[in-house]
Amino acid sequence: MANARALDKRRKSIRNIRKITRTMELIATARYKKAMDRANAVSAYTDRLSQIVNSLAAAGTEVQHPLLEQRENPKSARILVLSSNRGLCGGYNSSVLRTTLPQIEELKRSIGEVGVDVSGKRGIGGLKFRGVEADRQYTQFEDQPAYDEVEKIASGYLEQYITGQMDRLDVVYTRFVSTSKQIATIETLLPLGSLESDDASKDLGGEGSGEYEFLPSAESILEEVVPTSFKTKLFKCFLDSAVSEQVARMIAMKGATESAGDMIKQLSMTYNRARQSQITGEIMEIIGGVEALES
Amino acid sequence: MSLRCVVVTPERTELDREADHVSLPMFDGELGVLKGRAPLIGRLGYGTLRLQTAAGPERYYVDGGFAQVENDVVNILTSRAIPVDLLDSDEARSELDAAQDMSGKTPEEMQVKELATRRARGKVRASK
């Protein structure tokens, strides 16, 4: 049986680790709430935007835009991978990477030229290890991605797409479904496909679906709606991954804290046994000595 | 009962208050909105949003987006709304210079350049 002092040392270090994991869990919980609030705030914006799209459609405008159309024989594609800067968040990064790699292969086969952009140190490192070099790396996104930063990236992509340097943009991110379910998803953001948002909050326009006056014209508004909706979609991807990261960390750290507790229990038992047997051994020695002297 | 002006950005609701008169920086010029305006959806340009409130005038720089007027509520969707006092005039000027230096060889590049120039001009004008 291991010696009692070594066991005690080990137990102490596990206690310290448990303290750390518990703190991390609390921090992740607080950040998750903040990130969640931001993700909810963006829906106020997207709801209004889809309301405008709906009234454009209701006015009989044909929804047509170069960003919405599929390009014939695309030549170069781009993948944006959203991962986290920090580790210790369970399977969050690995599931993103696991989704990314087949997609890269697939695009290489069907389109040919594939560029990869990565956000987050973990993703950059993970892809490098698997032999994929990132063209552009973003490490400035933490738990609260700023719209200004995302918009810069989005405008860069729009520029590349319009000038024909890129024919397709896929984003790999972790979609937040609920606190117990986050899925790594691939979404094709360019070409946009349709303007309909997948949120079920489209009946907002019901309140006063009056006849609108379009200034300067419905077409001009549409020209602006499409890039804006691309930008908000990308922003939503960033927010979703931020929320998912915090949830993943929260759950991972909760598990770690619990396992540390179990381990401490186990070790305490072993330690007590070891201590008891040590004491028994010492007493036996004394008794043995006394008996030897008597005889 | 006066107008209600709501400014929403993707990050949060920037502004929600009552105003007597709202002046919107539309894509092709300014548009004044008073109480009782007919419903309207408009495209915003890069310029200054002016509010006449009971507490005095307020000015914000608005970075494109849309305006929707209905039932005496002015909804403004924009990527950024910055109070004019916080804008830096020198920074705006250097942005304009950078935009004018962009290459414009193809029609697409021209389009990108024009957009950047227009945005920078609006910023310079607002920051004065």
Image (tube, rainbow, N blue to C red):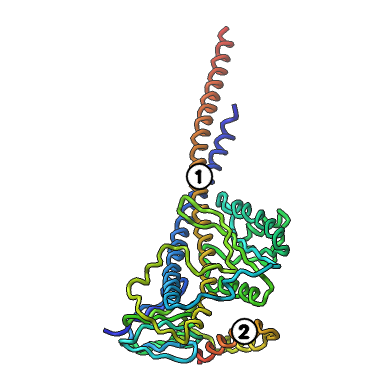
Q: Residues within 10 Å of mark 1 (few under 14, many from 20)?
A: some
Residue beneath disc 2: B111
| Residue A291, x across and y down, in percent | 56, 11
Q: Residue furthest top?
A: A295
Secondary structure type for disc 2:
helix
User: Going 53% across and 60% down the picture, which residue do you hit?
Assistant: A241
| Residue B82, x across and y down, in percent | 47, 81
Label 2 is placed on what type of residue?
Gln
The quarter of the rendered structure image containing the N terminus of chain A is top right
User: Going 41% across and 78% down the picture, which residue do you hit?
Assistant: B7
The quarter of the rendered structure image containing the C terminus of chain A is top right
Q: Nearer the viewer, residue B54 or A181?
A: A181
- From what the image shows, is residue A63 above or below residue A182? below
- Report whether residue A84 is seen: no
User: Going 52% across and 37% down the picture, which residue do you hit?
Assistant: A263
User: Going 59% across and 75% down the picture, which residue do you hit?
Assistant: A66
Residue beneath disc 1: A255
- Report whether residue A226 is seen: yes
Subunit ID for the residue under disc 2: B
Query: Marks 2 and 1: which is nearer the front?
Result: 2
